[in-house]
Amino acid sequence: MPTIKSLLDAPTLAEFIEKIRQQENTTGCFDILAYDLEFYPDGTLQVASKNLQGKFPVSDEADNDLAHIAEIPDHYFKDCDPELRSLSFNRRLRQKIPAEMPLKLVLQKDIILKVSNAKLLSAPRLPILDTVSNATPSNIQKEDLKVIEYEWNGQFDVSIISPISNCQPRENDTVAFGINISEDRNGAIQVQGAAFRCICSNGAINRICDGRHHRIRRPINRIDHQRVFLGKISSFAHDAWAQWPQHADGLSRLANIPIDLQRPASLMSRLRQAPFFLSAGVVNRILHRLHTEIDVHQNGTTLYDLWNAMTFIGSHEHGLSQTYRMRLRLGAGEFTRHESKICGECRQLLLT
């Protein structure tokens, strides 16, 4: 994530869209077949298609795509030595994947950025951003929207923040709200609420659900399906904007709910359960950051400090996997999606 100390430093939505437009002007998309590929120990991918021929280096995200296409667990694929990675991919591709399986390959500056299943509708970034922009409420000026970019390397994860949609849980500590758009490794799109703590550039995500799903999965690749796909994105975006006031109210309440750190075991246990699902190591990082938050303001420990600790690690600690960083931002969002409190007897964190 870029270092952005305030929303004033962030690009506007219009500037961000233009940046992506320029990037995509230098990007080529090629339809290929599974049997057109061969992976080499040096990390390059040989492509022998009628549409594209050559040997190209592979980005980290495209590396994950190759594991997904060959049905290889990505954590295993990353741990393999170069020879075994090459052997595993090529053998699995020949034995398990139909030779005629259509794929879409994205190439930029002779680097493979993405390899995806062409049977499914692509997730076009510019139309998605335009759709989200058009869902902006009438009381918010599109020209004022700012973009916080978390990831952009074959996948994307951006928050579009309205500086005027904000609250101050503590004096001179402003949190602004908006929406977040992200792409799963399988290409599904998530449109959710977003919060951005201006003083330290921390971000949280507030999950949106249509009653059954919170992911918008890519349909079969047909022209008439794109309108429905973008329509769902628009609907989720409208819901996310409509819910920001309740998240602002919930966040302000967190600053008045104390935490007793004399009994950290109960808090650690709760953060390892649903909906957080954090490892013991990640929870220890949270507690360490929590003490830093306490030292800064010295007014007692509250759930707002815990929210800050989780969002700080989720936004800034790149030593963590993308999965845990996303869980931390989503976990912090659960505090304002529910009625959050601490049980007076067992001191457990409750989300009701």
Image (tube, rainbow, N blue to C red):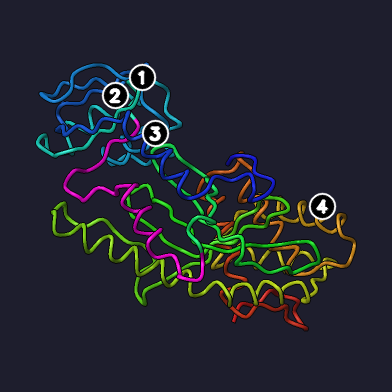
277 horizontally vs 240: left or right = right
Mark 4 belongs to which amino acid? Answer: Thr
Q: Residue at x 42, y 28 (%)?
A: 80
Q: Which mark is residue 160?
A: none
> Which residue is identified by label 3?
77
Pointer 1 with pointer 3, Cβ within 8 A: no
For the residues labelled 2 and 1, say whether their Cβ atoms are less than 8 Å apart: yes
Q: Nearer the viewer, mark 3 or mark 4?
A: 4
Work out how far the residue at label 4 is from the one at label 1, CA to CA, in angstroms: 45 Å
Dot 2 amino acid type: Leu
Looking at the rendered structure, the kind of residue marked 3 is Phe
Q: Is residue 111 above or below residue 126?
A: above
Residue on which the image places disc 1:
83
In the shown orientation, is residue 271 left or right of residue 152? right
Rendered-image quadrant of the C terminus? bottom right
Residue 120 in magenta stretch? yes
- The disc labelled 1 sits on which kind of residue? Glu
Give me the C-alpha separation between circle 3 and circle 4. Answer: 37 Å
Question: Residue tagged by mark 4?
Answer: 292
The quadrant where residue 295 appears: bottom right
Label 2 to label 3: alpha-carbon separation: 11 Å
Residue interval drawn in magenta: 113-140
The image shows residue 29 at horizontal and vertical percentages of 23, 33
Instruction: Report, in whole angstroms, how far the alpha carbon at label 1 lies from the one at label 3.
Output: 11 Å
Compared to 208, does 179 lie above or below? above
Instruction: Return the disc, 4 or 2, that comes first in the chain's sequence.
Output: 2
Q: CA distance from mark 2 to mark 1?
A: 6 Å
Which residue has dot 2 on it?
Answer: 87
